[in-house]
Each structure stands twice: as C-alpha cells, then as structure tokens.
Amino acid sequence: MSEELTKDIPELCKNTAVNDWLAERNQLIIQYCKLTGSRNQTELPEYQQVNQFCDILIDYVSAGHFEVYEQIVTACEVNGPDSMQLLEKLYPQITETTDIVVDFNDKYSRNSVSNHLTSLDNDLSLLGEAIAKRVELEDSLIDTLRARH
C-alpha cells in the first residue's frame, strides 16, 4: 500500500505495528519478484535466498495473525455489524492462504532446495497466487475500515 493511500487510513492503520506490517508486505513482494524473476529452469536459487524469503514470509503472516488482525477485529467491532460481517467472510479466506504459506515454508526452509527441483516453480506459482489473494483480502478489510471511520 502506498504512502499516499495510508494518509487517509484510520488511526488503526497509522500505528507502528500496521505500518511495519505493510512495509514487511512490500518487502515480501519485492523478494518474491526477485526470487521468481531470476528463475532459470536449469538453475535453482541459492538456499540462502529461499530461506531468507521464507523468513520474511512467515514474519509477515505471523504479524498479520498475531498483531494486526486483532486490531482490525477491534476496529470492526467498533464500526458495527457490516464491518464484522465482512471480517467474518474474509478471515476464513485469509486463513486458506496461510495454509499455503506454511506448506511452502515447511517444504523449502528446512530442506535443501535441490530436493524439490521438480516442484519449485509450481510451488512458487501457487504461493504467488495465495499472496495476491491475501493482499486483496487484507486491503478490502483496510478499505472498509477507512470508509467507515
């Protein structure tokens, strides 16, 4: 989310935890692009690069679940039943993306990437779709809070 958009977001989204989380999300997307953009079917990325990406991925998802979403729930409760209904609709979908993230992390952060040559590109593609869906869902929540604040 750009700085231009954050100037209009409610106080919830101006706090340090949310700003750090959004910055981490941007870093995650940059690292994902670096990892996938330099892919050459015959060469695997270095293990360190994949492991570093997995660290950012898990930090971002964890911060969302254990810090930011709690604040969003509180703000939705304050903003009324429509906000809570949206949250109840979107949160299970966000959780589905978490499962994909955790599976990718479990597969690639603990093992040598070379053990998974045949599935890396497919897994990166699936993960990219999950990240895109997650960003869209999170932005829907943030936009709803902004509109109702």
Image (tube, rainbow, N blue to C red):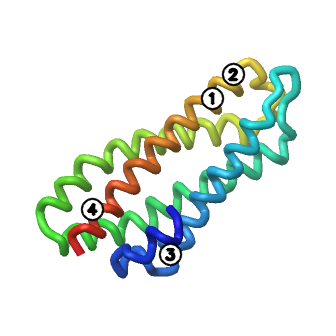
Question: Is residue 45 depicted above or below 66 in this figure?
Answer: above
- How many discs mark residues in the rendered view? 4
Residue reaching furthest to the front: 4
What is the CA distance from the residue labelled 2 to the residue labelled 1? 6 Å
Query: Of the numbered discs in the image, which one, if any, rests on residue 79?
Result: none
What is the CA distance from the residue labelled 4 to the residue labelled 2? 37 Å
Q: Is residue 65 left or right of residue 149?
A: right
- Labels 2 & 1 near each other (Cβ < 8 A): yes
Q: Amino acid at mark 3?
A: Ala
Q: Residue at x 80, y 25 (%)?
A: 115
**Mark 4 Cα shell of 10 Å, populated few (<14), some (14-19), many (≥20):** some
Task: Tell me the element at label 4.
Answer: helix
Residue linked to disc 2:
119
Task: Tell me the element at label 1.
Answer: helix
Q: Position of residue 109 (x, y in %)?
A: 72, 43
Question: Is residue 47 depicted above or below 81 in this figure?
Answer: above
- Labels 4 & 2 near each other (Cβ < 8 A): no
Q: Amino acid at mark 2?
A: Ser
Which mark lies nearer to you, 4 or 3?
4
Residue linked to disc 1:
123
What is the CA distance from the residue labelled 4 to the residue labelled 3? 19 Å
Q: Position of residue 87 (x, y in %)?
A: 26, 55
Question: Is residue 144 depicted above or below 44 in this figure?
Answer: below
Residue linked to disc 3:
17
